[in-house]
Image (spheres, coloured by chain):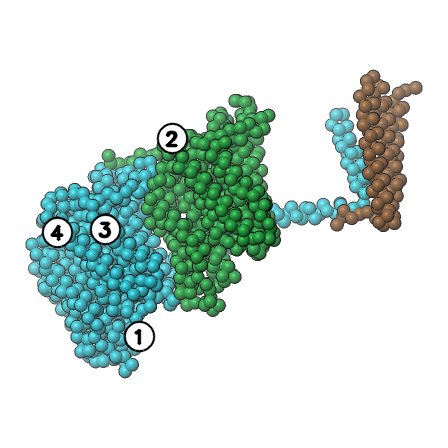
Chain colours: A brown, B cyan, C green
Amino acid sequence: MDISNYIYLSAILFTIGAIGVIVRRNAIVVFMCVELMLNAANLAFVTFARINGNIDGQIASFFTMVVAACEVVVGLAIIVTMYRSRRSASVDDASLLKR
Amino acid sequence: MTTRSDLVFLIALPLFSSALLLLLGKIANKWGHLFATVISASTFGIGLYEFFAMRSRSGDARAATQHLFEWISVGTFKVDASLLLDQLSICFVLLITGVGTLIHIYSIAYMSHDLDRRRFFAYLNLFVAAMLLLVLGDSYLNLYVGWEGVGLASYLLIGFWNQKPAYAVAAKKAFVANRVGDVGLSLAIMIAFTQFGSVTFAGVKSGAASASPAALTAIGAMLLLAAAGKSAQFPLQSWLGDAMAGPTPVSALIHAATMVTAGVYLITRSNFIFDASATARLLVVIVGAITLLFGAIVGTAKDDIKKALAASTMSQIGYMILATGLGPVGYAFAIMHLLTHGFFKASMFLGAGSVMHGMNDEVNMRRYGALGRVMPITAITFGLGYLAIIGVPPFAGFYSKDKIIETAFNAGGSKGILLGGAALLGAAITAFYMTRVFVLTFMGSKRWDDQAHPHESPSLMWIPMVLLSVGSVASGFLLSKGSALVHWLAPVVNASDSEGGVELMKPIVVSALALGVVVLGVMTAIIKYGRSVPVEAPEGSLLTRFARRDLGQDDLNHRLLVLPGQAITRTLVSTDYGFIDGIVRAVGWTLGYISTSLKKIQNGYVRSYALLMTLGAIALLATIWLVTL
Amino acid sequence: MSLLTLLELTPLLGAVLLYAVPRQNAKLIKQVAFGLSVVTLVVSGLMAYRFKTNATGMQFVESHSWISNFGIRYAVGIDGMALVLILLTTILTPIVFLAGWNEADNGRWSVRTFYVLMLVLESSMIAVFAATDVFLFYVIFEAMLIPVYLLIGGYGRGERSQAAMKFLLYSLFGGLLMLASLIGIYIISTNQIGGTFDLAKLATLQIDSGTENFLFLGFFIAFAIKAPLWPFHTWLPGAAKSATPATSVLLLGVLDKVGTYGMIRFCITLFPHATKTFTPLIIVLAIISILYGAFLAIGQRDINGLIAFTSISHFGFIVLGIFAMTSQGLSGATLYMVNHGFSTAALFIVAGWMVARRNSSQIEDFGGLQRVTPVMAWCFFIAGMSALALPGISSFVSEFLVLVGTFTRYPVAAIFGTTGIVLAALYVLITVQRSLHGPTTAGNEELKDLNLREKIAIAPVIAILILMGFFPKPILNWINPSSQQTMQAAGYSDPLPKAGK
């Protein structure tokens, strides 16, 4: 199988994720889309590591995973707090920065 | 050159006294005036001692110096605080301290009712110190310190009663007019330094010998500007009349006898400059001639006794300036007239003060009349001064003024005739207006109302007047006997014994002519004012009205300087805010506007930020792709 | 550690020490702060005593590596010019503390913060005159802005926030240009002698004239804003109107001198050729400043605004003297910086008292003060006389030196400058007449004259003004070698007398 298919898959996943972030209002879904984008990137990293025959990409993907894990912790905490204070998980309600 | 160590006391004593009286404040109220007077008298004592010490020396040893300390020293610009007492300065020292002391004594009584008498005496001593520094400094820069010092004292004294706005304005005007003159003095010093690398009198004198005529003329013109400011000469004369706002003893000391003659001192001191530049001399005589006529004409129209005397001072100093422009021999005559004028004008001013003292500070001569009967001593001393100024022999003015008229005629050619004619005409007008002053004040019928109780002034006031009037009788004779003053000053001003130039007329003819015009002037005045004088001034002819307005000097200054100055100020104030600061504010406003516009993008929706980010990333990639294509 | 570093640190340590005093005890804070400033004065006096008058070059030199990658060092040292400016700082600080004893009471923050900021400012002003590493100079030059910004914004009057912001932005803009030039000259130095910010080494660089002109302008505009020179002056009146008197004194009296000091120390020394190129333009700007400042001073209704514009006029004289490039001009300009410091201090302090008593800074609200408060009126009068450079008062010596120095090289400029003395007489005397003379304005009858503390505060300033008018010699002896060195660096020598000898 042509190894470039992995790259195409990664690009498609990334695009789906990006569109999800832009169009969805539910914070949880937005969050999951972000995760999707991160994993798309991970896939690309691993693929490139395979293509280049070294492990730099794989190391990068580990970093991404760690960051993603941290992000999950912080992000979910924020979403939960947001939901507690306003009884909604819609990102449009959190537009306080505007002022 | 002799070195002496006591010259500094001439300046230090009155300066110390002034500072002491000002710093002690009310504590010194009781004895301040006496202390100041004693200090002034002791400087006169030192002056006399120095004079006799100088007379006992001979030749070059007569001039004495004292080096005090190094004042400024930067690169080649070195100025020491040093004093120089030579034949010229000693004349001034004696005049300043002598007349000054008499006026201190007079002021004790004259100012006795004023709450601020101590402050007044502190200012008087400050003036004496500054004036002595002016005449004793051995360089132009030392002179400058004294020059501005007397200006400050004059400002403080004119504005002594500055709670009256008009008096405060008069003080300011005097200071500003003097400052215009000071620009001249500053520039003269700068040119001298640039040309000769020195600002001492000796240094400039030695440099002047080999200097370019243009530079000398420039220095001369600038010195003349300085002299015009200080001595109220055309075109900077307008402050002197207003300066009469000060207490009368001040007018006598500062604005008649001493400070206003500083310009004559400056030109005489700088004789080496003027001797070497005919153009500068010509400028000097023109200014002198214009001012002597100008002052005389203004004097004929003034009803305020002090302003009439002020106009007369201006005119008499015009004579002196004229004389200084007439070459080496003129300097001595200028100084002679300066000294005799110091006596008779101070005497008359003190007389005027005495009259005001008795008349509840009334200054309008139309409300005087017949005061001779109630104030006999004042009338006699004033009368002696009056006879001296119009030049009746054998009073002082006769000797000094005739010499100037004579020298003016001898200047040669049409210039001599013009200058001599102007001086002669001035003498006639002087006789007219001084007679007018005398007649209006002391003779004729009484025109004061019953509230006034004119009385003779106390002895502390009339004794100085008597002493000064003795001076106005005798000084001319004594100074000119055997050309005493001319010989005395010869080493300073390089005057030879013979009066240079072509002799147009014999001295006796000039004297006869002068006497003739004087009699004419006196007769005219007596005919006009001898019988009845209206209490309210008649409207008068166009010329009279013009002369009453000081020949339009203030109107001219107003139009030429004040109005444009105000316009410039107003324009600049609005430009500064509107334009220069406006640009700055415009920059700020523009940034603010751009920010407010861009703020709209920040709508607070996460997804629109995400969209923007995505679009940005796509644009970036597209750019990279296009560029690398 | 040299005495100089100790002097820099004294007020800074003092500021830290102030935090040991409880915030509520305002009186103790003031006393401690005053005491610390006196200690600083004593240390600076000791330094002046040890300063060798006739030695050339920098003294009290100290140098440590700071950011070694870029060759940046903590390098300090002073010559005569820096010494007199440091003395000016250390003398004025205790005086303004004493004069403005109560002016921090109604600020936005505590009294303690005010004195901490003041001491930090004093420390940085000493350091800025002492720095011989250009980067160190730049850092302190910018850091100084912070205390001043807070002092104006937190303790001032009227539109204080706006004035403080304008001051800050103006100065930052200038600082940015200077930073650009600084980087430029560093890069040139890396190519020629290895990267350094040492002033003496940078002065030896060979820079091509186009680059040199740009680098010069970067420095010059920063200093012209600070000085301030027309047309970069519009921040000053607002700052002067809003700041408290103590801040104004340090701002106009000392801090602005960094501008003129920098022109001598950096612009001329680093860029002698560009200096030559721009001299005509700068002299024109200086003349405009002299006359423009004077005219605007005449047109001012606010007494602090008036003092600000007189300062613009006086800074014109200083810049004129600097760029005349004669020993009289340079020494006169340096002396002028000191004299203007004391003269402005006297004006601001007395005006501050007048404003505090009358609760208005409009000149027309005063009037007849000479009868009501004679001592205060005298102090204001003497300060005014020093502003118009009356002979016998210190400013005369410096103003005349500047003019005579300018005249020997640029007579026309000197003639224009000299007419400034008439305008000076006008703006001083008009103000004196309106505020001190005339009948007493309604509402002023009960004003109190100076108390003992205020008399003690102003007495040294007036004594210095008069004493230095007659004995400027010691200070000139310190300044003259620096001027000679600057002239050598710029490749100028005094014009010779044209005739005689």
- Contact, CB < 8 Å: mark 1 with mark 3? no
Give the Cα distance between marks 4 and 2: 50 Å
- Asked if badges 4 and 3 are on one and the same chain, I answer yes
Residue C171: in sight, yes or no?
Answer: no
- In this rendering, would A42 be left or right of B478? right
- Callout 1: 10 Å neighbours few (<14), some, many (20+)? few
Q: Which residue position holds label 1? A: B539
Q: Label 1: chain? A: B
Q: Mark 1 is on which residue type?
A: Glu
Q: Label 2: chain? A: C
Describe the element under mark 3 as helix, strand or loop. Answer: helix
Closest to the camera, between mark 4 and mark 1, is: 4
Vertical placement of A7 versus B24: above or below?
Answer: above
- Asked if badges 1 and 3 are on one and the same chain, I answer yes
In the foreground, C226 or C444: C444
Tell me the number on the disc at residue B52: 4
Q: Label 4: chain? A: B
Closest to the camera, between mark 1 and mark 3, is: 3
Q: Earlier in the sequence, mark 4 or mark 3?
A: 3
Give the Cα distance between marks 3 and 2: 38 Å
Q: Which residue position holds label 2? A: C55
Give the Cα distance between marks 1 and 2: 76 Å
In the foreground, A26 or B80: B80
Tell me the number on the disc at residue B9: 3
Q: Mark 3 is on which residue type?
A: Phe
Residue occupying the point 31% across, 52% down: B148
